[in-house]
Amino acid sequence: MKTLIIFYSRTGFTKEIAVHISEELDCDIEEIFDLKSRKGILSYIWSGMESAFRKTPEIKEIEVDPSDYELTIIGTPVWAGNMASPVRTYLSRNNDKLNRVAFFCTMGSRGSKRTFLEMERLSEFNPLACLALTNNEIKQEKHIKKVKEFIDKIKKNYKKI
């Protein structure tokens, strides 16, 4: 299956997982870039508020068209119990171009259930699989087994369709 991974990463955790999945699947990958800086404590607080209030900030134009892919895997950090607002912008702009989806998120401790429900609502698809990882799991390299299980579930559910 022709697969695209699209992700946003503020601190690097989500990017690390996106790259890992991309290497395992040997697929295309593109990062979502914000048009404003998210560095520093004030930007951290603002990002959480923006996410909680379901804002859709401006993002850099994406170069890859997801309609060219059978599957789009979308990755987001969890901010204030929600998907990162740049990912919300991406889904809002591109939900009509998606064919099938899978989701992953990285987080400090919790928020994956609400994040995945909102991603499902915005994409208008039931995901083939979802993967939630804490930053500690990534730091301690406990994510490797979970990434493999995520990929196996995607492949299994894709064959059922």
Image (cartoon, helix red, strand yellow):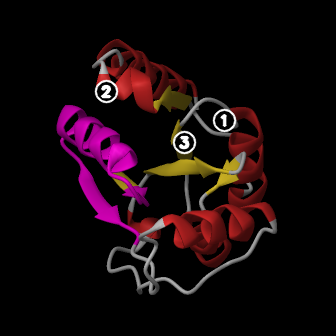
Disc 3 or 1, which lies upstream in sequence?
3
Q: Which one is nearer the viewer's eye here, 80 or 3?
A: 80
* Residue 64 visible in the snapshot: yes
Residue displayed at 46% across by 72% down: 38
Residue 103 x, y percent position in the rendering: 54, 42
Name the mark nearer the viewer: 3 or 1.
1
Q: Which one is nearer the viewer's eye here, 102 or 59?
A: 59
Vertical order, 149 against 160 (above or below): above
Asked if the magenta segment contains residue 92, the reply would be: no
Give the number of the disc on residue 103. 3
Q: Residues within 10 Å of mark 2 (few under 14, many from 20)?
A: few
Instruction: Report whether 113 appears left or right of 127.
Output: right
Provide the secondary structure element on which disc 3 rests: strand
* Residue 88 visible in the snapshot: no
Instruction: Report whether 8 appears left or right of 127.
Output: left
The amino acid type found where label 1 is placed reads: Ser
**Which quarter of the rendered picture does the C terminus lie within?**
top right
Q: In which quarter of the view is residue 86 placed?
A: bottom right
Asked if the magenta segment contains residue 15, the reply would be: yes
Q: In which quarter of the view is residue 30 placed?
A: bottom left
The residues colored magenta run 6-32
Q: How crowded is mark 1: few (under 14 residues within 10 Å), some or many (20 or more)?
A: many
The residues tagged by marks 3 and 1 sit, at their Cα atoms, a distance apart of 10 Å
Instruction: Report whether 126 appears left or right of 8.
Output: right
In the picture of the structure, the residue carrying the numbered disc 1 is 112
Instruction: Report whether 115 appears left or right of 102.
Output: right
